[in-house]
Amino acid sequence: MAKDASTEKMKRKVYEKELQKLQVQLCHLQEWVKAHKLRVIILFEGRDAAGKGGTIKALSEKVSPRVFRVVALPAPSDREKSQLFIQRYMQQFPAAGEIVIFDRSWYNRAGVEYVMGFCTSAEHKRFLSLCPQMEQYIIEGGIILIKLWLEVGMEEQERRFNARIDDPLRQWKLSPMDTESYRRWYDYSRARDLMFKTTNSKHAPWYIIRSDDKRRARLNCISHILSTIPYGRVKRDKIRLPKRSSKGRYNDQTSLRGMKSVAERY
Protein backbone atom coordinates (compact mmCIF):
# COMPACT_ATOMS: atom_id res chain seq x y z
CA MET A 1 0.00 0.00 0.00
CA ALA A 2 1.77 3.13 -1.21
CA LYS A 3 1.49 6.25 0.90
CA ASP A 4 2.69 9.82 0.84
CA ALA A 5 5.05 10.90 3.62
CA SER A 6 2.45 13.35 4.88
CA THR A 7 -0.35 10.76 5.09
CA GLU A 8 -2.03 10.54 8.48
CA LYS A 9 -1.62 7.42 10.56
CA MET A 10 -3.62 4.39 9.48
CA LYS A 11 -7.09 4.00 10.95
CA ARG A 12 -7.75 0.96 13.14
CA LYS A 13 -10.53 -0.53 10.97
CA VAL A 14 -8.40 -0.36 7.82
CA TYR A 15 -5.45 -1.84 9.69
CA GLU A 16 -7.41 -4.74 11.14
CA LYS A 17 -8.93 -5.59 7.75
CA GLU A 18 -5.53 -5.66 6.04
CA LEU A 19 -3.90 -7.50 8.94
CA GLN A 20 -6.47 -10.27 8.77
CA LYS A 21 -5.71 -10.81 5.06
CA LEU A 22 -1.99 -11.04 5.77
CA GLN A 23 -2.48 -13.36 8.75
CA VAL A 24 -4.42 -15.76 6.53
CA GLN A 25 -1.39 -15.83 4.22
CA LEU A 26 0.87 -16.44 7.22
CA CYS A 27 -1.20 -19.55 7.98
CA HIS A 28 -0.62 -20.74 4.39
CA LEU A 29 3.10 -20.00 4.80
CA GLN A 30 3.11 -22.00 8.02
CA GLU A 31 1.71 -25.09 6.31
CA TRP A 32 4.23 -24.70 3.47
CA VAL A 33 7.16 -24.43 5.89
CA LYS A 34 6.00 -27.57 7.70
CA ALA A 35 5.35 -29.54 4.53
CA HIS A 36 8.67 -28.62 2.90
CA LYS A 37 10.69 -28.72 6.14
CA LEU A 38 12.05 -25.20 5.66
CA ARG A 39 14.19 -23.47 8.26
CA VAL A 40 13.76 -19.72 8.64
CA ILE A 41 15.25 -17.07 10.92
CA ILE A 42 13.62 -13.63 11.14
CA LEU A 43 15.48 -11.21 13.35
CA PHE A 44 14.18 -7.87 14.57
CA GLU A 45 16.43 -5.04 15.61
CA GLY A 46 15.86 -1.35 16.23
CA ARG A 47 15.95 1.29 18.92
CA ASP A 48 13.95 0.94 22.12
CA ALA A 49 10.26 1.75 21.52
CA ALA A 50 10.63 1.14 17.77
CA GLY A 51 7.69 -1.28 17.86
CA LYS A 52 9.43 -4.65 17.70
CA GLY A 53 7.19 -6.32 20.28
CA GLY A 54 3.93 -5.24 18.67
CA THR A 55 5.13 -6.22 15.22
CA ILE A 56 6.20 -9.66 16.41
CA LYS A 57 2.84 -10.13 18.13
CA ALA A 58 0.95 -9.24 14.92
CA LEU A 59 3.18 -11.66 13.03
CA SER A 60 2.81 -14.59 15.42
CA GLU A 61 -0.58 -14.28 17.15
CA LYS A 62 -2.61 -16.34 14.63
CA VAL A 63 -0.10 -19.08 13.89
CA SER A 64 1.22 -22.06 15.81
CA PRO A 65 3.99 -21.35 18.36
CA ARG A 66 5.39 -24.75 17.39
CA VAL A 67 6.18 -23.37 13.95
CA PHE A 68 6.61 -19.63 14.61
CA ARG A 69 8.86 -19.73 17.69
CA VAL A 70 9.67 -16.37 19.31
CA VAL A 71 13.05 -16.08 21.06
CA ALA A 72 13.79 -13.15 23.39
CA LEU A 73 16.90 -14.06 25.34
CA PRO A 74 17.61 -12.44 28.72
CA ALA A 75 21.02 -11.05 29.66
CA PRO A 76 23.67 -13.80 29.44
CA SER A 77 24.50 -15.80 32.56
CA ASP A 78 28.08 -16.07 33.85
CA ARG A 79 28.33 -19.45 32.11
CA GLU A 80 27.08 -18.03 28.80
CA LYS A 81 29.52 -15.14 29.06
CA SER A 82 32.34 -17.71 29.04
CA GLN A 83 31.05 -19.32 25.82
CA LEU A 84 31.53 -18.23 22.23
CA PHE A 85 29.42 -15.10 21.75
CA ILE A 86 27.18 -16.66 19.09
CA GLN A 87 26.79 -19.95 20.95
CA ARG A 88 23.63 -19.21 22.93
CA TYR A 89 21.91 -17.88 19.82
CA MET A 90 22.78 -20.92 17.72
CA GLN A 91 21.14 -23.16 20.33
CA GLN A 92 17.86 -21.48 19.33
CA PHE A 93 18.24 -21.98 15.57
CA PRO A 94 15.33 -23.64 13.74
CA ALA A 95 14.90 -27.31 13.04
CA ALA A 96 13.07 -28.48 9.91
CA GLY A 97 9.61 -26.95 9.68
CA GLU A 98 10.33 -24.03 12.02
CA ILE A 99 10.46 -20.24 11.78
CA VAL A 100 12.42 -18.67 14.62
CA ILE A 101 11.76 -15.01 15.34
CA PHE A 102 14.53 -13.27 17.29
CA ASP A 103 13.35 -10.30 19.35
CA ARG A 104 16.84 -8.85 19.33
CA SER A 105 19.64 -11.15 18.27
CA TRP A 106 23.38 -11.52 18.04
CA TYR A 107 23.34 -7.90 16.85
CA ASN A 108 23.12 -6.91 20.51
CA ARG A 109 26.91 -6.80 20.28
CA ALA A 110 26.73 -4.16 17.55
CA GLY A 111 24.17 -2.09 19.46
CA VAL A 112 23.48 -2.05 23.17
CA GLU A 113 26.62 -3.97 24.22
CA TYR A 114 28.86 -1.62 22.24
CA VAL A 115 27.13 1.64 23.19
CA MET A 116 26.73 0.76 26.87
CA GLY A 117 30.27 -0.61 27.24
CA PHE A 118 29.27 -4.24 27.88
CA CYS A 119 31.88 -5.43 25.40
CA THR A 120 35.33 -4.17 24.52
CA SER A 121 36.14 -2.25 21.35
CA ALA A 122 38.16 -5.26 20.19
CA GLU A 123 35.19 -7.60 20.73
CA HIS A 124 32.93 -5.21 18.85
CA LYS A 125 35.34 -4.91 15.95
CA ARG A 126 35.81 -8.69 15.78
CA PHE A 127 32.05 -9.25 15.75
CA LEU A 128 31.51 -6.85 12.85
CA SER A 129 34.34 -8.52 10.94
CA LEU A 130 33.13 -12.09 11.45
CA CYS A 131 29.36 -11.56 11.28
CA PRO A 132 29.03 -11.57 7.45
CA GLN A 133 31.06 -14.80 7.31
CA MET A 134 28.92 -16.39 10.01
CA GLU A 135 25.72 -15.42 8.19
CA GLN A 136 27.10 -16.82 4.96
CA TYR A 137 27.64 -20.10 6.79
CA ILE A 138 24.06 -20.02 8.12
CA ILE A 139 22.60 -19.43 4.66
CA GLU A 140 24.79 -22.05 2.98
CA GLY A 141 23.50 -24.47 5.62
CA GLY A 142 20.02 -24.04 4.13
CA ILE A 143 18.49 -21.50 6.53
CA ILE A 144 16.53 -18.55 5.14
CA LEU A 145 17.73 -15.44 7.02
CA ILE A 146 15.67 -12.23 7.09
CA LYS A 147 17.11 -9.19 8.90
CA LEU A 148 14.72 -6.35 9.77
CA TRP A 149 15.51 -2.97 11.31
CA LEU A 150 12.61 -0.91 12.68
CA GLU A 151 13.49 2.77 12.39
CA VAL A 152 11.59 5.10 14.71
CA GLY A 153 12.05 8.87 14.70
CA MET A 154 13.36 10.88 17.63
CA GLU A 155 10.07 12.66 18.35
CA GLU A 156 7.99 9.48 18.09
CA GLN A 157 10.33 7.59 20.42
CA GLU A 158 9.98 10.38 22.98
CA ARG A 159 6.18 10.26 22.68
CA ARG A 160 6.17 6.48 23.25
CA PHE A 161 8.49 6.72 26.24
CA ASN A 162 6.26 9.37 27.83
CA ALA A 163 3.21 7.18 27.18
CA ARG A 164 4.92 4.33 29.03
CA ILE A 165 5.70 6.56 31.99
CA ASP A 166 2.03 7.50 32.38
CA ASP A 167 0.45 4.10 31.65
CA PRO A 168 0.55 1.47 34.45
CA LEU A 169 -0.04 -1.24 31.84
CA ARG A 170 3.14 -0.27 30.00
CA GLN A 171 5.46 0.95 32.74
CA TRP A 172 7.14 -2.47 32.84
CA LYS A 173 8.42 -1.74 29.33
CA LEU A 174 10.52 1.19 30.57
CA SER A 175 13.76 0.12 32.24
CA PRO A 176 16.82 2.14 33.29
CA MET A 177 18.50 0.75 30.15
CA ASP A 178 15.72 2.23 28.03
CA THR A 179 16.03 5.68 29.54
CA GLU A 180 19.79 5.57 29.07
CA SER A 181 19.34 4.61 25.41
CA TYR A 182 17.02 7.62 25.06
CA ARG A 183 19.81 9.88 26.33
CA ARG A 184 22.36 8.36 23.94
CA TRP A 185 20.36 8.75 20.72
CA TYR A 186 23.34 9.74 18.56
CA ASP A 187 25.63 7.09 20.03
CA TYR A 188 23.07 4.51 18.92
CA SER A 189 22.79 6.18 15.51
CA ARG A 190 26.53 5.89 14.96
CA ALA A 191 26.52 2.27 16.13
CA ARG A 192 23.64 1.55 13.72
CA ASP A 193 25.45 3.19 10.82
CA LEU A 194 28.63 1.21 11.47
CA MET A 195 26.63 -2.01 11.79
CA PHE A 196 24.91 -1.43 8.46
CA LYS A 197 28.18 -0.53 6.77
CA THR A 198 29.86 -3.78 7.77
CA THR A 199 26.99 -6.31 7.89
CA ASN A 200 24.65 -5.24 5.07
CA SER A 201 25.90 -7.99 2.77
CA LYS A 202 24.57 -9.21 -0.56
CA HIS A 203 23.74 -12.60 0.92
CA ALA A 204 22.17 -11.20 4.10
CA PRO A 205 20.93 -7.63 3.51
CA TRP A 206 19.23 -5.42 6.05
CA TYR A 207 15.70 -4.19 5.36
CA ILE A 208 14.53 -0.93 6.95
CA ILE A 209 10.94 -0.56 8.14
CA ARG A 210 9.80 2.94 9.05
CA SER A 211 7.84 2.52 12.26
CA ASP A 212 6.55 5.93 13.32
CA ASP A 213 3.14 4.57 12.29
CA LYS A 214 3.04 1.23 14.10
CA ARG A 215 0.12 -0.14 12.10
CA ARG A 216 1.68 0.55 8.72
CA ALA A 217 4.99 -0.84 9.96
CA ARG A 218 3.38 -4.13 11.02
CA LEU A 219 1.60 -4.56 7.69
CA ASN A 220 4.70 -3.65 5.68
CA CYS A 221 6.79 -6.06 7.73
CA ILE A 222 4.46 -9.04 7.30
CA SER A 223 4.00 -8.27 3.60
CA HIS A 224 7.78 -8.21 3.14
CA ILE A 225 8.24 -11.54 4.91
CA LEU A 226 5.55 -13.14 2.75
CA SER A 227 7.23 -11.81 -0.39
CA THR A 228 10.68 -13.01 0.72
CA ILE A 229 9.82 -16.67 1.39
CA PRO A 230 8.41 -18.44 -1.71
CA TYR A 231 5.37 -20.47 -0.67
CA GLY A 232 2.15 -21.91 -2.01
CA ARG A 233 -1.07 -23.47 -0.74
CA VAL A 234 -0.75 -26.90 0.80
CA LYS A 235 -3.73 -29.10 0.02
CA ARG A 236 -5.31 -30.40 3.20
CA ASP A 237 -7.88 -33.14 3.61
CA LYS A 238 -11.19 -31.83 4.87
CA ILE A 239 -11.55 -32.52 8.57
CA ARG A 240 -14.81 -34.06 9.75
CA LEU A 241 -15.71 -34.58 13.38
CA PRO A 242 -16.37 -38.25 14.15
CA LYS A 243 -19.59 -39.32 15.85
CA ARG A 244 -19.16 -39.06 19.59
CA SER A 245 -19.28 -42.49 21.25
CA SER A 246 -22.05 -43.03 23.80
CA LYS A 247 -20.40 -46.14 25.19
CA GLY A 248 -20.00 -45.83 28.96
CA ARG A 249 -22.31 -42.83 28.97
CA TYR A 250 -22.98 -41.15 32.36
CA ASN A 251 -23.67 -37.69 33.79
CA ASP A 252 -20.09 -36.46 33.91
CA GLN A 253 -21.05 -33.22 35.71
CA THR A 254 -22.10 -34.93 38.95
CA SER A 255 -18.51 -35.85 39.71
CA LEU A 256 -17.66 -32.13 39.85
CA ARG A 257 -20.00 -31.44 42.75
CA GLY A 258 -18.19 -30.44 45.91
CA MET A 259 -15.14 -29.19 43.99
CA LYS A 260 -13.96 -25.63 44.54
CA SER A 261 -15.07 -23.28 41.75
CA VAL A 262 -13.83 -19.89 40.64
CA ALA A 263 -16.28 -17.13 41.60
CA GLU A 264 -18.32 -16.04 38.57
CA ARG A 265 -17.80 -12.28 38.86
CA TYR A 266 -18.38 -11.58 35.17
Image: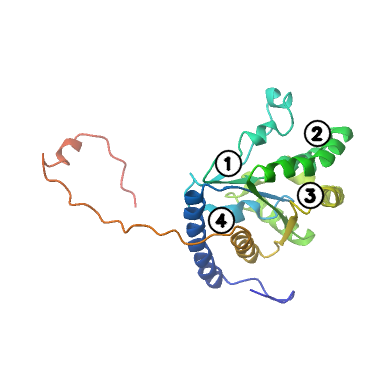
Q: Which residue is mark 4?
A: 59
User: Callout 4: 10 Å neighbours few (<14), some, many (20+)?
Assistant: many
Name the residue beneath numbered marker 1: 94
Left or right of 213, for residue 26: left
Residue at numbered disc 2: 118
Mark 3 element type? helix
- Residue 77 screen position, x and y as percent: 68, 26
CA distance separating discs 2 and 4:
31 Å
Asked where in the image residue 180 lies, by quadrant, the reply is top right
- Residue shown at 64% from the left, 37% from the top: 73
Residue at 80% across, 52% down? 200
Residue type beneath disc 4: Leu
Give the CA distance from mark 3 to mark 2. Answer: 17 Å
At label 2, the amino acid type is: Phe
Q: How far is the residue under mark 1 from the one under mark 4?
A: 17 Å
Q: From the viewer's perspective, is residue 30 above or below residue 210?
A: above
Residue 23 visible, this angle:
yes
